[in-house]
């Protein structure tokens, strides 16, 4: 069977599918609200929680064999407890007694495991790293100048990061868009 990996948002599902495919050189598919890129050979499919909810509703109502499509179901970010996540957990509770084959993995960076009914809980000890949060504050213009363009603001923030992090081992930057990330990677 295939591996289903859920994400709460479309952007996360599509970008993770692309990143994992690039890192592993394995065909990875994605299926989100109104867009999908899934081929028969795709072993792993990233999808939104809502997409998997729709799949399970079809399983419960129409086609029980459809439920056998996935041998592993990974529900990521379960701590967010969205409506779709709640429906997924209820659907799995109904489906698993009839079809115990799929392995279900609940993942979250922070999760109170006592609140879940789980057969096994594996706690992975993380390593704490010191984090300095720095926000670029110098994005204004001087009086009389035109307002900074968005690209100038992003460029100024990038220069600020490079200047203040000189000699640092690692720098993690959260740009607002994918295009900004591409600009940073090209620098």
Image (tube, rainbow, N blue to C red):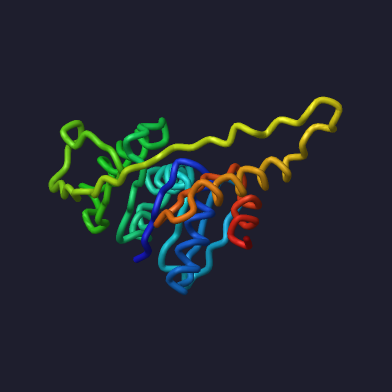
Of residues 159 and 47, the one drawn nearer to the viewer in this rendering: 159
Give the percent coordinates (x, y) of residue 77.
Answer: 36, 41
Q: In this view, does 187 lie above or below 74?
A: below
Q: In this view, does 165 lie to the left or right of 85?
A: right
Give the percent coordinates (x, y) of residue 118.
Answer: 16, 42
Of residues 41 and 109, the one drawn nearer to the viewer in this rendering: 109
Which residue corresponds to the image point at 37% horizontal and 37% vertical from the top-left?
85
Which residue corresponds to the image point at 35% horizontal and 54% vertical from the top-left?
67
Give the percent coordinates (x, y) of residue 151.
Answer: 73, 45
- Residue placed farthest to the top in the image? 143
Image quadrant in which the C terminus is located: bottom right
Q: Toward which corner of the image does residue 49 lie, by quadrant?
A: top left
Q: In this view, does 38 lie to the left or right of 148?
A: left
- Residue placed farthest to the left in the image? 119
Of residues 22 and 58, the one drawn nearer to the viewer in this rendering: 22
- The count of marks equals 0
Q: Toward which corner of the image does residue 115 lie, by quadrant?
A: top left
Q: Is residue 118 above or below residue 43?
A: above
Image quadrant in which the N terminus is located: bottom left
Q: Is residue 184 left or right of residue 79?
A: right
Which residue corresponds to the image point at 58% horizontal and 60% vertical from the top-left?
185
Give the percent coordinates (x, y) of residue 44.
Answer: 41, 63
């Amino acid at each position: 069977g295939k591996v289903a990996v859920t994400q709460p948002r479309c952007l996360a599902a599509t970008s993770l599918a692309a990143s994992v495919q690039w890192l592993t050189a394995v065909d990875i598919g994605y299926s989100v609200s109104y867009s999908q890129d899934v081929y028969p050979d795709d072993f792993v499919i990233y999808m939104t929680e809502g997409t998997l909810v729709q799949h399970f509703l079809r399983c419960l109502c129409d086609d029980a064999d459809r439920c056998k499509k996935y041998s592993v179901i990974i529900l990521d970010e379960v701590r967010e407890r969205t409506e779709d996540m709640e429906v997924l957990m209820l659907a799995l509770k109904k489906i698993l007694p009839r079809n115990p084959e799929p392995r279900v993995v609940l993942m979250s960076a922070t999760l109170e495991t006592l609140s879940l009914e789980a057969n096994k809980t594996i706690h992975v000890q993380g390593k704490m790293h010191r984090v300095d949060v720095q926000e670029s504050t110098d994005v204004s213009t001087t009086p009389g100048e035109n307002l900074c363009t968005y690209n100038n603001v992003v460029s100024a923030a990038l220069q600020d990061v490079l200047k203040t992090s000189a000699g640092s081992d690692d720098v993690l930057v959260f740009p607002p868009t994918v295009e900004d990330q591409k600009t940073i990677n090209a620098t």
